[in-house]
Amino acid sequence: MNYSEYSFKLEGHEDFHQDILIDALSRVGFDTFEDIEGGFRAYAPENERTEEKVAEIALEYSSLFTFSYDVKTIAHQNWNEVWESNFEPLKINERCYVRATFHEPHPEYEFEIIVDPKMAFGTGHHQTTELMMNLMMKTNFKGKKVLDMGCGTGILAILASHLGAENIVAIDNDQICFESTIENAALNKIHNITPLCGSKESIPDEEFDIILANINRNILIDQIDSYSAVLSPKGSIFLSGFYQDPDLKIIIDKSIDFALEYITHEKKDNWVAAEFQSRL
């Protein structure tokens, strides 16, 4: 299958403008993104409607900030081989070892996670995934009921299970991510994850002790009311996928409306993961 490669360049933009574009593109079939100087590249299976959808997105956001893009066709290649050649094992806090099936195991680590992401987001290499995992390893998950929103490869849900969570619901609106979570849970012999394909409307009507959401600022703001509605009293929410400036203050201000108290955050390269707790 050939892919279309769109190269976006943004001029005089705020950091979150790029996130807005990536979010919009991911909703119309783009499944892989790569940072470049001054912008990013986006990839989607070649389709005659893709150019039309991108033009609609450009028209929608062109009045908000300035950007340009060009496109070229990437000939079919073995994407898994390309991915394997670039995937390196990851050590987090010297406690967790994230590897693929083709890497040697290291059972001396407290937690070892096997992830074959294919085109799904979440290998642990992005700053936000690592920050979320850092916060999680400082938290008591034993016997807890967990919701993982925007689960990607399922890496956070798998770590939650390793940390002692009783059961986990993992939700993503991308079919590839949904299937990847199922496959990776099986690879890690995890049996207490329930994957669902959907968005906030798929959240079960039940209480969760801990909610994980590593998505982006705009989706978090849109969905935070849905999270708070199913959070148990004194439950915890971990949010990431946004920058420290200006996003963290915006998220904190929004959380107040839903009886959530800011607890702490961690930062790496201006990316942030923050912890909140129900005040109810």
Image: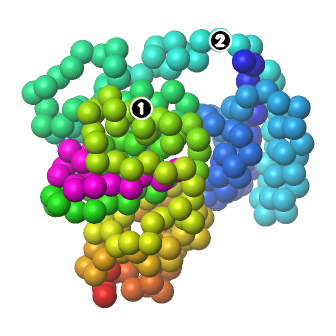
Judge the density around disc 2: few (<14), some (14-19), many (≥20) Cα neighbours within 10 Å. few
Crowd rating for badge 1 (residues with CA inside 10 Å; few <14, some 14–19, many 20+): some
Quarter of the figure with the N terminus: top right
Asked whether, in this view, residue 74 is left or right of residue 93, the answer is right
* Amino acid identity at mark 2: Gln
Residue on which the image places disc 1: 183
Residue 138 in sight here = no
Residue 44: % across, % down: 71, 32
- Is residue 161 within the magenta segment? yes
Q: Which image quarter is the C terminus in?
A: bottom left
Looking at marks 1 and 2 on the same chain, the residue that comes earlier in the sequence is marked by 2
Residue toward you, 51 or 16: 51
Circle 2 sits in a helix, a strand or a loop, which is it?
A: loop
Residue assigned mark 2: 77
Tell me what residue is drawn at x 43 percent, y 39 percent: 181
Count how many numbered circles sit on residues in the image: 2
CA distance for labels 1 and 2: 23 Å
Q: Secondary structure at mark 1?
A: helix
> Is 52 displayed left or right of 232 in the figure?
right
Magenta stretch: give its range: 159-172
Measuring 57% from the left and 66% from the top, which residue is drawn there?
Answer: 201
x, y percent for residue 51? 87, 37
Q: Please name the residue shown 33% across and 54% down the image.
A: 168
CB contact under 8 Å: marks 1 and 2: no
**In this figure, which colouring scheme has been used for the structure?**
rainbow
Residue 194 drawn at (x, y percent): 39, 50
**Residue at horizontal 42%, vertical 37%?**
182
